[in-house]
Image (cartoon, grey):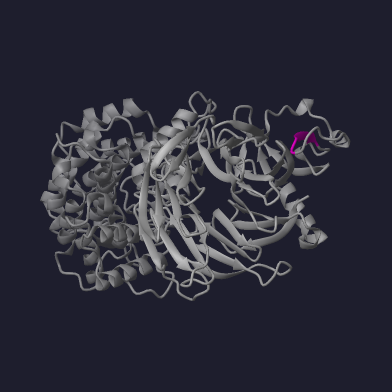
Amino acid sequence: MFKLSATLQSHSSDVRSVVSPSPTLVLSSSRDSSAIVWTRPDESATFSPTTVYHPSSRFVNAVAYLQPTPEAPQGYLVTGSQDGIINVYILGTEQQEPSYTLLGHAHNVCALSTTASGTIVSGSWDQTSIVWASFQKRYDLRGHAQSVLAVLAISEDEYLTASADKSIKLWKLHKCVQTFTGHTDVVRDLALIPDVGFVSCSNDSEIRVWTMGGDTIHILSGHTSFVYSVDLLPNGDIVSGGEDRTVRVWADGECKQTIVHPAISVWTVCAMPNGDIVSGCSDSVVRVFSSVKDRWLSEGELKEYDDLVAGQALPAQQIGDVNKSKLPGLEALNNPGKKEGQTIMVLNPQGVVEAHSWIGGAWQKVGDVVDAVGQNRKQLFNGQEYDYVFDVDISDDPNAPKLKLPYNANENPYSAAQRFLAQNDLPPSYLDDVVKFIEKNTSGVSIGTGSGFADPFTGASRYQPAAAQAGGGAGVYQDPFTGASRYQAPAAPTTSSNNSANYADPFTGSSSYRTSSSTHPAAPAAPAAPAPATATKLKVLPVKTTLPFRQANIGAMQAKMKELNETLQHSGVSFVSMSDARSLDRAFLYVQSVDPATGASRGNAPEPRWGDIDVVLQMVGSPQWPESHRFPGIDLLRLLFAFCPKPAGAPENFRTVALDSLLSACNWQLQADHSAPVSKSRETNLLLVLRTLANCFQIGGASGTEAFGGGQWTEKLFTELGKCNYEKLSKPQHAALATLLLNFSAVALIDNEIDASSRQKQYELTLMVLQKEEADSETVLRSLAALGNSIYKAGTKPSDARLTPILEHISSKFREERLDNIISDIRALSS
């Protein structure tokens, strides 16, 4: 009977790989970009982390051990990372840099195996395995059709590889001599069984024991989800771990013991030479289990662990269908289980469904069952309930290790996808792939009778038109982009001639934008502007506050820029100099110190000067930086112009300089070419450029009357934007362009220095957007506000025959009260 012997806590994210070459040494690697060496003086002592290595800025997915040599008396630690690089460290030294770096894979290195003489075998998402001898490439093993997820060095000249293509291959030197088939899904791991063959595990929930001749000796069934890892104990028993939260011990073809973990995934298991078991999980913890009583934790600590397991919430889909009316009560636990690991559900007196597993001859509570979608059931993820929690991988290999994607049936797939990408440090170019995955796997699900619309761009919540209020008040609207607050059209005014409507920042939701009111005065209209030629009381116009794009995952942005720069270094392309790197560090330090809700600095970081910003502009505008590498730099500029609207040391024409670099960064001339195809990288870059340009127009100052963004550059800006092929832009790009138009119109209310040509070009572009936008009411809302501001600022009734048909079409097309309110104001200003 195995019980908890040690808990090793130092990682901050999923532990993806563990290996234990001796009873006093454990090596682990994690998605927190680190590998840790855990040691103890003897088997009765406690493990402690003695060395922490950082082989990569990305996930470290594999770890292995090389036997001692004269160069390394304590052996070597080998790591494989998401960046495709293998690093080798000499253990027992203070050196943090790798002694050897092995380059050869084009993608994530997710599997490593070693021999006693120092041969390393690696497997990668690039569909290859490589054999390394003396830290040099010896063979490329090519033959799998998908990612190689497991490798096993049988001898110096024989190797096994397992793949997402569901097959296992045996290699002698560099030639494939046999292919093993039988698993019906991705093959995850391999372990050698001396004198018999080997054992494999798979996403098909099965463990198979094979002879080297290809015969299947045993098929071990018991896991209820993916089996990620397998190893052989010194006594010949098999140990496995998987997505069902369990480590299982197998003997003679039967499950001998089930060890439930307080985590979603048991990613990795290994056997220690003394017969103990090491596991690594999605809860960032490495655990050691022992069958030797003297190595068990105290009774109190074991009870704490059991209570932690019992307190977990289990998705119903992991257990099976739940019909509470047919569940037995706690009395069912008086009957013995039929086999090790059997799980049953009982209904406790409080009406909560509990899951209990038959473990070691007794029923052990393993959690409370959380309902799932389909029968009004929910799943719990990070403390919140969702209709679905998908296993998702947006890499080139759709069957590679999965990330968790939570999704509610009443939210827009773009919302969930955007959140998923931000949380997992993934580029925005993957957005469409994730959305397609969600739509495919939730087709046909009814989301009720409500008329909910989720934010299709950042989507932290949704926008939903409310029922009409008593007394003829307008409906309530939630922020359609982040939902952190709301826009509410007020009831018809009774006293003020220019009553307010409140608006939340529709992109960050953390600071609101409002029209003028008695309690929240907004920027007054420019003194020289005449009053609008109407006595009608306006409901919404003018909109006098700009909408900045301020939210960002800055740490991920910085890591991505570093990663892409390192990629360029390896390819021999000109990269960031030391002085440029210092400018980038100052820029990141400052934007990290700023509160995105207010735009105010929360620390003592100095504001970047123009020279620092110009470094980023030159970088993204340089042809030496490939188009696919520019997006983190453009995103940094988005924040810099939001938080530093007037950088110190900037030349008078700095916005023109910025515009030229930004247009170059998104290959604007190709964007304006209606026949040119649009790559995913170019689409992402253009979206970020439009958001950056929108942030160039701001209203600030202590009294909210200082305008930023005006100047001669605006004529060139709208001349260029007028060339765009609107139909080729994506929905997020439409929204960004409309926000740019709105921000300019708000600044133009105050800044009388903006020339008439710029105002006219902006007006024409706004009309074009309103004429062509047929799908997204949010884009129409911002464009209408921009149009209304322009007419309000002019102070005279426009004689534009295009206005009436455009407004009538919008009103009949969208039929939303919030749009009708602005249309009503525009008509009042025009009549």
In the figure, is residue 39 to the left or right of 655? right
In the figure, is residue 622 to the left or right of 827? left
Place of residue 74 in the rendered image (x, y in percent of width and height, measured from the top left): 54, 70
In the figure, is residue 88 to the left or right of 825? right
Point 23% across, 66% down: residue: 615
> In which quadrant will I find the C terminus?
top left
Tell me if residue 211 can be seen.
yes
Place of residue 49 in the rendered image (x, y in percent of width and height, measured from the top left): 59, 69
Place of residue 187 in the rendered image (x, y in percent of width and height, measured from the top left): 52, 38
Tell me if residue 492 can be seen.
no
Place of residue 420 in the rendered image (x, y in percent of width and height, measured from the top left): 46, 45
- Compared to residue 317, the image places residue 35 above or below, namely below
Point 25% across, 51% down: residue: 689
- Compared to residue 273, the image places residue 429 above or below, namely above
Point 74% across, 68% down: residue: 44
Nearer to us in this view, 487 or 122: 122
Q: Is residue 346 magenta?
A: yes
- Compared to residue 455, the image places residue 119 above or below, namely below
Region of the chain picked out in magenta, as a range: 341-347
Residue 331: quadrant of the picture: top right
Nearer to us in this view, 649 or 250: 250
Residue furthest toward the left?
757
